[in-house]
Amino acid sequence: MGHSSELVSATIKAYDVRGVVGEQITEELVRDVGASFARLVRDKATEIVIGHDMRDSSPALSRAFGEGAQSQGLNVVHIGLASTDQLYYASGKFDCPGAMFTASHNPAKYNGIKMCYAGAKPVGQDTGLRAISAEIIEGVPAYDGEPGTSREVNVLSDYAEFIREQVDLSGLRHLKVAVDAGNGMGGYTVPEVLGPLDMEIVPLYFELDGSFPNHEANPLDPKNLVDLQKLTVECGADIGIAFDGDADRCFVVDEKGDPVSPSAITALVAERELAKEPGATIIHNLITSHAVPEIVTELGGKVVRTRVGHSFIKQQMAETGAVFGGEHSAHYYFRDFWGADSGMLAAMHVLSALGEKEQKLSDLGAKYERYVASGEINSTVDDAKARTEAVRAAFADRTVSTDELDGLTVELGNGTWFNLRASNTEPLLRLNAESPSKQATDDLVKEILSIVRG
């Protein structure tokens, strides 16, 4: 029996499977996705590793996926509770495909699956999800061979040790670190990774709770950072770190409680990686600050600019052999972590950079903040293409250059630029703008939005 094409198109997205539990994401659907994924990888793999986050629905769904994979002859390794980057670690360590059950920062009623090939290589629409969609609509063919086996393995301490080995943490000064896990998987991984180090961890919302009783586990939204900002200042921490629900993204605030932009973190980590490997390639997406390519170039690194979205960055990481990649959304990718993203590894780099010196994080971060960014501003529009063309025309007499790598990017010179790109899934136009001053950025945004929103 297959599933309706409406259901499948609503749940199988560009990079993952996601939907409301019970209505869209059911054990039956997930079992079939597991079976179809097993068929996809069966000629290259004999086992699949599966992890899950702290949502109430995650254990049963991950078991159903495993049953589907076993029914197609693949052996299953369950690692149980895990952050998404811990699942990537297991996929790399065991050199086998993986599936992570999480809906990241989405509300409690959602769940989903992030799948990867061996060595944490991404599975997207063009690299497997489209084939899986077609197969589960038609019905997954039965397998006449022996079913696979199932075993449980705990990789948490191995993962923690691996993360610590990636960053030189010797001889650092004692740091006080406030951490907001947002009731997500950071509450499980942070004590294991940071516990053995010379740091005082001040924990906030470390209890695993998939109903997110305190705030949404999405640190990109400023309202979800407020509790961490307050705690960091009140307890006199050197740094505050927030993780999203599945702990693959990290967000940083300084000792004053001020956010350190993901672009600044990208530049900071890039500088450290280039010190280890001069001339290496660094990747950034096209809406990170212009400070990132400027700093990388000044340090003698090679810069590769990509579209927004983890599948594009991971593809470029593989093709270019880049040592590191960063996104405005606080995803950070490491060649030595199978090209995958790890919020924890990015946090370790910042902690190491801070602990090596006596200066405060606000002073350390300032050197990487050269411009003032608007942040991403969404507008609901009927015709994204027409609105974009209207903006292009309005700025034509001031434009130095444009490109269409991802939406429309307009360079206005002297460090001033903006990007307008349409959402793939909603009737939204997303604006990112940057200039050397807050006033100039505010004025630019106001002018663009007056055209976009009419």
Image (spheres, rainbow, N blue to C red):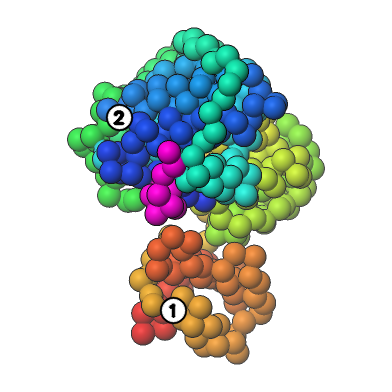
Amino acid type of disc 1? Asp
Q: Nearer the viewer, residue 181 or 150?
A: 150
| Callout 2 touching callout 1 (CB < 8 Å) | no
Amino acid type of disc 2? Ser
Q: Secondary structure at mark 1?
A: loop
The residue at 62%/34% (across/down) is 40
Residue ID for mark 2: 57
Indicate the position of residue 74 as horizontal and vertical percent values.
58, 20
Q: Quadrant of residue 102?
A: top left
Indicate the position of residue 105 as horizontal and vertical percent values.
35, 41
Q: Is residue 124 visible?
A: no
Indicate the position of residue 253 as horizontal and vertical percent values.
39, 41
Q: Earlier in the sequence, mark 2 or mark 1?
A: 2
Residue ID for mark 1: 383
* Eye-nearest disc, 2 or 1: 2
Q: Nearer the viewer, residue 297 or 388?
A: 388
